[in-house]
Image (spheres, rainbow, N blue to C red):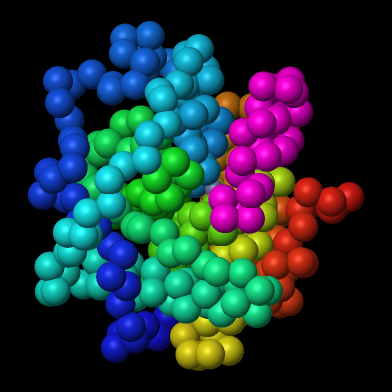
Amino acid sequence: MKWEGNRESDNVEDRRDGGGGGYGGGGFGFGGRSIGIGTIVIALVGGWIFGINPLTILGLLSGGGPPAQVQQQGPAHKPPADDRMAKFVSTVLADTEDVWTDVFTKGGATYQKPRLVLFRGATQTACGQGQAAMGPFYCPGDQKVYIDLGFYETLKNRLGAPGDFAQAYVIAHEVGHHVQNLLGISGKMDQMRSRVSKTEYNALSVRLELQADCFAGVWAHHAQNARQILEQGDVEEAMNAAAKIGDDALQRAGGGAVVPESFTHGTSAQRQRWFDTGFKTGTVKACDTFSARVL
Ligand SMILES: [Zn+2]
């Protein structure tokens, strides 16, 4: 991916030096002792990686989530200028800002930029305490994407998805959840949660996640048209990452049986297909996973 020298975002908040939360007393900040390691493991296997709001899912499993509060928006504590990885993340975020601002403007709407928080280990969010083990996630309550950059090591070494464009796809997917939040889709999902069965909710969650993959593809489409960011093998890197984090692949990797009803993110093939749909068409309309008969 060709990104060096491109614009960097002002919306990256660096909490890696411990500012803004972290491990307090060794316990999990939400739900207290009722959340054992079993729940954590189940939630992980059930698709925490890339979840829209894993904290809510965890709250659901333990019978009561944390209250959602919007945090105060002070100026972002920026990462150091010589931090190459932070620079990369900041450049990708800026690129998503440019693309989605454009897409929203053309659709007669205004894009509100999300913030991206770099943290290490654990951090406070409007959705409860975020943990690195969850993988990157988006919290609709404070409109922030959270990522512990250690996840990229996991992606490369444990999940077998290396490459800078795979890393960019991760951010674009989370930003896709922010777009869903702005479009009111996340809110509708939240309302559904109490009305439908767990199996039905999982099925909806799959559509939500596949749409975020499709939106990541929409970003890649426009970024390529505007800035020619792609190099040989980049799309394959994103497609490979999409495959490696499919629910079936993760369940297999977890050593368990593949249980389709428990899927919350979609299969490898579906995740690849929807990223590709967004990438080829470049339109939000093409990403209507909720009406699609075949995922
Ligand atoms: Zn997701």
Q: Is residue 55 left or right of residue 193?
A: left
Tell me which segment is drawn in magenta: 180-206
Q: Is residue 278 left or right of residue 25?
A: right
At 70% from the left and 67% from the top, the residue drawn is: 284
The answer to which image quadrant residue 260 occupies is top right
Residue 145 horizontal/vertical position (percent): 40, 52
Is 237 drawn above or below residue 227 in the view shown?
above
Residue 11 horizontal/vertical position (percent): 31, 65
Which is more toward the observer, 88 or 290? 290
Question: What count of labels does the image hold?
Answer: 0
Residue 64 horizontal/vertical position (percent): 48, 15
The answer to which image quadrant residue 262 occupies is top right
Is 8 drawn above or below residue 26 in the view shown?
below
At 62% from the left and 33% from the top, the residue drawn is: 190
Which is more toward the observer, 241 or 134? 134
Please name the predominant secondary structure of the magenta segment in the image.
helix
Q: Residue furthest top?
A: 34
Residue 207 horizontal/vertical position (percent): 71, 46
Q: Is residue 74 magenta?
A: no
Is 30 drawn above or below residue 91 in the view shown?
above
At 41% from the left and 25% from the top, the residue drawn is: 67
- Quadrant location of the N terminus in the rendered image: bottom left
Q: Is residue 55 left or right of residue 248?
A: left
Which is more toward the observer, 266 or 106? 106
At 28% from the left and 52% from the top, the residue drawn is: 73
Q: Is residue 1 left or right of residue 105?
A: left
Q: Is residue 130 visible?
A: no
